[in-house]
Amino acid sequence: MPRKVTVLLGSPRRSGNSETLAVSFAEGAAKSGYKAQMIRVNGLKIGGCIDCRRCWTNGSHCFLNDDMKEVYASIDKSSVITFVTPLYFYSWPTQIKPVWDRLLPYFSPNSKVDLSGHRAVLIATAGDDDDKCFDGLRKSFELACNYAKWKIAGELLVPGVHEAKAVSSKEEILKQAFEMGENLKPR
């Protein structure tokens, strides 16, 4: 049975730069024995965490009844969680930020699923040419992974890809994404 990686697509743009990298990453992961489940969070109805602290009280992850159930179901069965996103004003776009906030049930004292020791990957693109533009996103990812007790298994941050298909012509970057997936090697 193949191991599973959840790939959360945070862009509102289909087949854009970040999603193109995600596909290369997933192909590499498949070569290494992983099955990738891609979840496009844009279009899902995912409300923000309301900090009610009712996690697991109704037998499910979260008291809110929305499309986050699909995300939870995938994460529960994965050993690697991959966040794929464009950079919006030096941070996470609206589409993927609620997913981060709604991971709280995994850290509840009543949690029925333990994600500590899982691995996390960050793939991000930006139109800005200065790679320092990723500093805020990178720090947020690092802090969240430390809190969650996740090992950062890879990071690919690609500046200077503003046009919709700009990354498609960057073979070296696509190869890096593929190799990052391939290097997941089951433990």
Image (tube, helix red, strand yellow):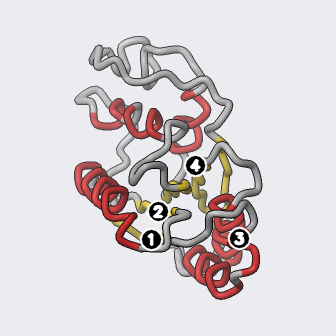
Question: Residue 176, image x and y in percent?
Answer: 59, 82
Picture quadrant where residue 169 is located: bottom right
Callout in the foreground (2, 3): 3
- Residue drawn at point x = 62 percent, y = 48 percent: 11
x then y, percent, for residue 23? 71, 65
Mark 1: few/some/many CA within 10 Å (<14, 14-19, 20+): some
**What residue would you read off at disc 1?**
155
Check disc 2: other Cα within 10 Å, few if <14, some if 14-19, many if 20+. Answer: many
Give the residue type that dot 4 points to.
Answer: Leu
Q: Label 4 crowding class (10 Å Cα cut-off): few <14, some 14-19, many 20+?
A: many
- Please name the residue that numbered disc 2 is placed on: 122
> Which comes sooner in the sequence, label 1 or label 4?
4
- Residue 59: quadrant of the picture: top left
**Does residue 187 appear to the left or right of 148 in the view shown?**
right
Q: Amino acid at mark 2?
A: Leu
79 to 28, vertically: above or below: above
Mark-to-mark CA distance, 1 and 3:
19 Å
Which disc is residue 166 wearing? 3
What kind of element bears circle 4? strand
List the residue tagged with mark 4: 8
Residue at the spot x=54%, y=25% of the render?
Answer: 46
Closer to the N terminus: mark 4 or mark 3? 4
The x and y percentages for residue 177 are: 60, 76
Q: CA distance from mark 2 to mark 1?
A: 5 Å
Picture quarter containing residue 127? bottom right
Q: Contact, CB < 8 Å: mark 2 with mark 1?
A: yes
- Residue at the image position 55 percent from the left and 28 percent from the top: 68
Mark nearer the viewer, 4 or 3: 3
